[in-house]
Amino acid sequence: MMNTQPASSRRRLWLWLAAAAAVAVVVAGVVGLGMIYGPRDDPAPQPGTTTRAPSTPSTPATSAPPAAAGVDGCLGGDSRSPQAVLDAQAAAPHTPEGAVSFAITFSRWLAQKPAVPADEVAVIDGTASLAPNLASSAASAAEFEATQFYLTSLNGYYRINTFDSDRVELTLMLPLVVGGAIDPTLNFMPSYAVVWTDAGWAIDDGVDVEDANTLRTTGVAIKGGC
């Protein structure tokens, strides 16, 4: 289906699949976390109850966040399993960089085809993710045209958009691996609100960001990765 992004004030999770040379965008509508697959348009060189922590007003990212521990592009190990997500949640420090590291592992689990099965979603839903309709968001990866794909944090980028001690809004750019090779044009570019909970960082929801594809110039390169 050919379409444009629907107008909505509600934060939504959309799967955008864009060909590198195309302006039109194929949109599979999924309410929840924002899943964006797109070309690199910028200049070249994502069971139980978890209590949300109270939030205070965020600081714009123009005030540089602390960079003490750095970002780990392979937190929780190199698998794309729900256990890796839970391990990353347990290991991620209570810093903006910890939130980014956790979000990278979550995205590597969420965005893959074959799509993650319902039993894996059940492990993450309500623990490492508080977002609505996580199952539908995960299943939407099946709309991707290739037979299979997964993400890598190698050659990826991140940007911290806003932050305070218990809430971080961030954007990622993670290359797709298709047919066993990193695709030269396609990236997974989600923007998340990540909140600190009793279990550690958790995905709260997707957030709307218009310039996700500029991370090569507005973001920070992920060192290392898997």
Image: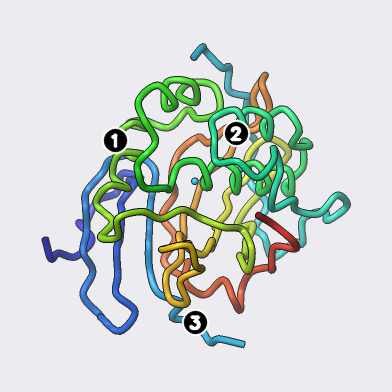
Residue 162: x %, y % from top left:
62, 53
Query: Residue 10: which quarter of the image?
Result: top left
Q: In front: 23, or 62?
A: 23
Mark closer to the chain start, 2 or 3:
3
What's under tag 2, amino acid-wise?
Val
Quickly name the residue at label 2: 85
Q: Residue furthest top?
A: 48
Which quarter of the image is occupied by the C terminus? bottom right
Which quarter of the image is occupied by the N terminus? bottom left
Q: Give SS at disc 2.
A: helix
Mark closer to the chain start, 3 or 1:
3
Mark 1 neighbour class, 10 Å CA radius: few under 14, some 14 to 19, many 20 or more? some
Q: Are marks 3 and 1 in contact (CB under 8 Å)?
A: no
Q: Is residue 106 above or below residue 60?
A: above
Q: In front: 62, or 85?
A: 85
Quickly name the residue at label 1: 136
Q: Give SS at disc 1.
A: helix
Rounded to the nearest angstrom, the CA distance separating label 3 from label 1 is 30 Å
Quickly name the residue at label 3: 42
